[in-house]
Amino acid sequence: MVLLLLPVAVGACGSSGDETATTTASPTTTIVGVSAGDEQLIVDSWKHLSDASLGGPDAIVQSVADSQYPGTGYTADDCRIATFGGEDAPAGYMVEYVVDESTIRLDPEWVIDAGSLSGVKPDGTTYAMGVRFITSYRDSPATTADVEVRVTILDGVVYHHPNCG
């Protein structure tokens, strides 16, 4: 089974995003430069994505089509095929996304690495972070995968960068 990074569009939630947070991840690691507003948008986007999973596989793949980075062009069918290999989704399929907030960092040089925009530096502010994907479905034990991913915030909206191709 392929794990699919799904995008979610989340608005600014009333924050100006101008505040800068310094988060201490451990006694020797400090993350500087991530605004408190952007960090909250990112965390909310992963929560929203996990909540979308409650609606089942169709809701998950539809969220990809509805909120991918502008111009990416993947359809819900593209993402369904990439996720389930053209097969029906397993009964009870769900994904929980847990962002490791201590790993959120600016990644201004990153370029999109898949799809029609491969090689393009996205507009907006791009962040890298570690996310744990916890995948489960009926009658099977949950599996986890720790993945480094990128999101881009553009005009107060968080976009994820799925590979549905």
Image: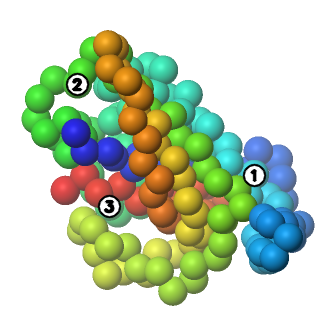
Disc 3 secondary structure class: loop
* x 25%, y 52%: residue: 164
Q: Nearer the viewer, mark 2 or mark 1?
A: 2
Does 127 sit above or below residue 10? below
Q: CA distance from mark 2 to mark 1?
A: 31 Å
Q: Which residue is mark 3?
A: 72
The percent position of residue 40, horizontal first and vertical second, equals: 75, 51
The percent position of residue 161, horizontal first and vertical second, equals: 41, 59
In what quadrant of the picture does the N terminus appear?
top left
Does 145 sit above or below residue 48? below
The image quadrant that residue 84 belongs to is top left
Type of the residue with mark 3: Thr
Q: Is residue 67 left or right of residue 40?
A: left
Number of on-image labels: 3
Labels 3 and 2 touching (C-beta < 8 A): no
Identity of the residue furthest to the bottom in this view = 109
Type of the residue with mark 1: Gln
The dot on residue 40 is: 1
* x 33%, y 46%: residue: 4
Type of the residue with mark 2: Ala
* x 31%, y 81%: residue: 119
* x 72%, y 61%: residue: 102
Does 118 sit above or below residue 41? below
Q: Nearer the viewer, mark 3 or mark 2?
A: 2
Does 17 sit above or below residue 100? below
Label 2, residues with CA under 10 Å away: few <14, some 14-19, many ≥20: some
Q: Which residue is mark 2?
A: 89
The image quadrant that residue 10 belongs to is top right
